[in-house]
Amino acid sequence: MLRSTSSIAQVPRYLSNYKSLYQIDPRAANKQWFEDAHFGLFIHYGLYSQLGKGEWVQFRDTIPVHEYAQLKDAFTAQGFNAKRIVALARRAGMKYITITSKHHEGFCLFDTKETDYNSVNSPAKRDLIGELAIACEKAGLGLFLYYSYAADWHHPYFYAAEPNGFSRPFYLEKQPEYQYEKREDFRHYITYVHAQLRELLTQYPTIAGIWFDPIKGVYNRPELFPIEDTYKLIRQLSPHALISFKQGANGEEDFMAPERGGNTRVSVDNPLAQQVYVLNQDKLKEVCNTMQKHVKNIQGENWGYNKGLDGHHLKVLEVRALLNESYEKHYNLLLNIGPLGDGSVHPEDVYTLSNLNKK
């Protein structure tokens, strides 16, 4: 685990070529590096990986909270190898990695004192984020931490399920684990989030930034989320850290991060979305896409591992086409893999990424 506080004197290794600018303005140096980096590896890994039906399986199949949480007891991550993941990213020409520290399911891949719903308190007994942070630092790769800010299907005080939202799965029976009753209760969740962000930014001070999701949760209930306070906390704890929140939550993000195809506009009927789009439209952009293809009639999502998509992963020429498009349209490409249940990288993805730069 990397425990210390970030300082201007401590230049992360991935920023070693930007030292002069870092001494003047750490965040400006990080932005310049990010623009130059261009190509990154996205990793969706969690309890859902064991089921092989995508990262939204708890929501889509309305698996009861208690039943879903039992997946923690089988979480070994025995195939998760940070050094191999970093080596694979480097072979593909990637300059950074973004990994789910906590997805909507609420399970954490890092050492946290805020909940026992984490990888250290599972059979794995490992801080996977800490391992990856060390491997990235040694290899000179940047590391962003994805954090599900506006959805948590495990925390007792996240707000209740609503039509056209995904704050909670639509359970037919009351879940005793859920204790949210009134708006004031949501402060318990925000306190939890801020405590975890403090952990992430102090335990792993060399990370490149925080990658928030899902933006629709903020657009649906903006009054619940103290975005300015959250961003202020990050800026105070890490002078260089970049912040993204998809198309944007308040316009103070460092870059936009839409999904697939570079479409940066969402929720055209939402005033907040429209306002933030105007503020962010000229900023750096990063588009994420997936190695697992979207295939009609195959159930489940394709960010986390979906067994039904075996044999339907991008090939070398298809990834090259995505890269070419990203250069033509001037945005970073964040290419996602969904490791298998044991944490190992899917063999199809290993082959493609290993051969991406071969002639």
Image (tube, rainbow, N blue to C red):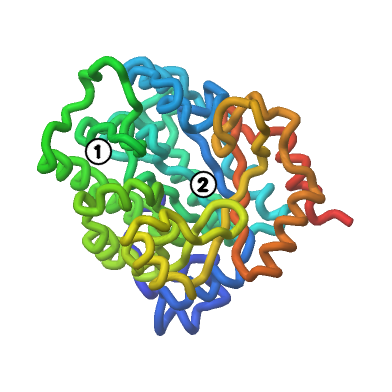
Q: For mark 1, give the secondary structure.
A: loop
In the image, farthest residue toward the front: 269
Q: Position of residue 153 (x, y in %)?
A: 33, 31
Q: For mark 2, give the secondary structure.
A: helix
* Whether residue 34 is situated above or below residue 261 in the rendered picture: below
* Whether residue 79 is situated above or below residue 144 in the rendered picture: above
Q: Position of residue 143 (x, y in %)?
A: 50, 55
Residue 125 vs residue 37, the one in the foreground: 37
Say which residue appears at 46% left-offset and 43% top-offset.
100
* Whether residue 143 is situated above or below residue 306 in the rendered picture: below
Dot 1 corresponds to which residue? 114
| Residue 314 seen | yes
Residue 197 vs residue 161, the one in the foreground: 161
Q: Position of residue 41 (x, y in %)?
A: 60, 51
| Residue 10 seen | no
**Which of marks 2 and 1 precedes in the sequence?**
1
Say which residue appears at 78% left-offset and 43% top-offset.
315
Q: Quadrant of the C terminus?
A: bottom right
Q: Is residue 250 left or right of residue 282?
A: left
Say which residue appears at 37% left-offset and 48% top-offset.
216
Q: Is residue 169 left or right of residue 336?
A: left
Q: Disc 2 residue type?
A: Leu
Q: Disc 1 residue type?
A: Glu
Badge 2: few (under 14), some or many (20 or more) residues near its Cα, within 10 Å? many
Dot 2 corresponds to which residue? 132
